Image: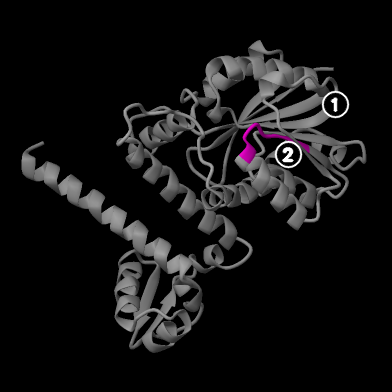
Amino acid sequence: METPEVMQVFERLIGSVWTFSALSYAAEKGILEQLDEPRRLSHISENTRIPITLVERILDILIALSLAKREGDTYQADKGLLPLVTPPRKTFFMGNLKSNYFESRNLIDSAKETETELGWNFTEPEILQSLGRAAFRLGDSIFKEVVPSLGDLASRLQEPSARFLDVGAGMGGIAIAACRFLQNLHAVGLEPQDASLTEAHKNIAEAGLTDRIELRKERIEDLTDKDVFSLVYFPQAFMSDNVVKLGLQNIWRSLRPCGWIIVQTIAIPGMELPAALSRLRDTLMGGNARFPSQLQAMLSDAGFISISTIPSSMVATFNFITGQRPV
């Protein structure tokens, strides 16, 4: 490319940053929720306490994105936007916006350091909770879309003796979603970081699930349970190759015969921008940008059978790799 063409790329990137910022601001300040029906600028300004001129500038951007429309002197959200910015999906939508902001900001800030440290290193409650909110939607996806496709697992998880293991429980979002979806289920969450454990205990208490979710300050490589769990969720993107290999061995042993593992993958091959970004995020989390095909081979080496890949409906680059411990 010639220099002017390169500059055009930069201009588009800068525009993307400002567009994302405007959308995040509109979501956080409640502008999007005000657009559930035709509203005048004065109404939105009064109800959000935002200067009317700023409201208009933000709405201009939403219109440019086809996320809102203007008719006369009123504005209204596109019909596809409203389900995302109102309960129950608003929690995930906001969590997704904030988590991407915090993760990308962390990458920029790390450039100031002498050495760049890979892996999960967030400790601030606001950041942890924003990342954790995205996990609630992920938990719903796992138990509504993935579990029903795994033989008779859904019915076995209804039994009073059913146990679910959430590796890297974070703020407890997936374990909470699991116990809300399955009324008899008990869960164990492994979380080695103190800051995340503190927030997880708060969230589990607020959900009224302290009697059904046990949190352990423990790493997957230290797991010693045997023949306990009917299902294990394993977010391998936070772990090195060696930890994943050892973790799969420990998980195999911890599962009951015919129990299942669900492994989430983030990275995909290819040179398209979404694929390249998926590998960047995976690497920053501490993983090695392992692809679904590589995880399938690792599950096979660990002794799992009935291995398959299930695409996620949440993010195009996310996949779930499933495998079963044989009888």
Determine which of the numbered discs, if any, sits on residue 228 in the image: 1
First along the sequence among labels 1 and 2: 2
In the image, what residue occupies the spot 39% across and 72% down? 68
**97 drawn magenta:** no
**Residue at 33% across, 33% down:** 113
Residue 221 in which image quadrant: top right
* Quadrant assignment for the C terminus: top right
Residue 304 position, x and y percent, is 71, 17
Residue 196, given in percent of the width and then of the height, sits at 62, 42
User: Can I make out residue 239 in this image?
Assistant: yes
Pick the front one: 80 or 226: 226
Camera-side residue of 165 and 197:
197
Which corner quadrant of the image does residue 235 belong to? top right
Numbered range of the magenta stretch: 188-194
From this viewpoint, is residue 39 visible?
Answer: no
Q: Which colour scheme is used?
A: one colour
Label 2: how many Cα within 10 Å (few below 14, some 14–19, many 20+): some
Identity of the residue furthest to the top in this view: 301
Check disc 2 and give the amino acid type. Val
Residue occupied by mark 2? 147
The type of residue carrying mark 1 is: Val
Vertical placement of 156 versus 292: above or below? below
